[in-house]
Image: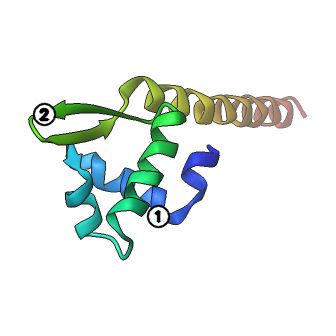
Amino acid sequence: MQALGDPTRRAVFEQLRSGPRSVGELASGLPVSRPAVSQHLRVLKGAGLVTDEQQGTRRLYRIARDGLEALRAWFDSFWDAVLAEFKAAAEGEEKV
């Protein structure tokens, strides 16, 4: 979660939604340098949210499905708790 706390990292992550991209492609859509984008990608990769693969002379980055599923499960756990509380409250009002 901390990895997505930075607005630039979120922007990089958002760009990867449309498919794999190189550092140059990512940097062209952002107001930061290529080295800065590379640094942000390292953080995202360390958090398990991004993977990379070498294709010829380029390295392509993509969203890591496993990392995204773990993040979603974490958010879903909050919804599960909130919905359970809502259900309990609604059922409690029904009995009154």
Q: Which residue sits furthest right? A: 96
Which residue occupies the foreground of this view, 84 or 35?
35
Of the 4 image quadrants, the one containing the C terminus is: top right
Label 2 environment density (alpha carbons within 10 Å; few <14, some 14–19, many ≥20): few
Give left or right: position of 79 versus 45: right
Q: Which mark is residue 8?
A: 1
Provide residue 47's location: percent of width, then percent of height.
54, 35
| Left-right relation of 9 to 22 | right
Towards the viewer: 57 or 82: 57
Q: Which residue is mark 2?
A: 55
From the image, state whether disc 1 or disc 2 is nearer to you: 2
Q: In front: 16, or 71?
A: 16
Where's residue 66, x and y in %? Answer: 42, 23
User: As drawn, which residue projects farthest toward the left?
Assistant: 56
The total number of labels drawn is: 2
- Residue 18 is situated, as x and y percent measured from the top left of the image, at 21, 48
Tell me the amino acid under the disc marked 2: Gln
Classify mark 2: helix, strand or loop. Answer: strand
Instruction: Say which label, 1 or 2, has the lower sequence index.
Output: 1
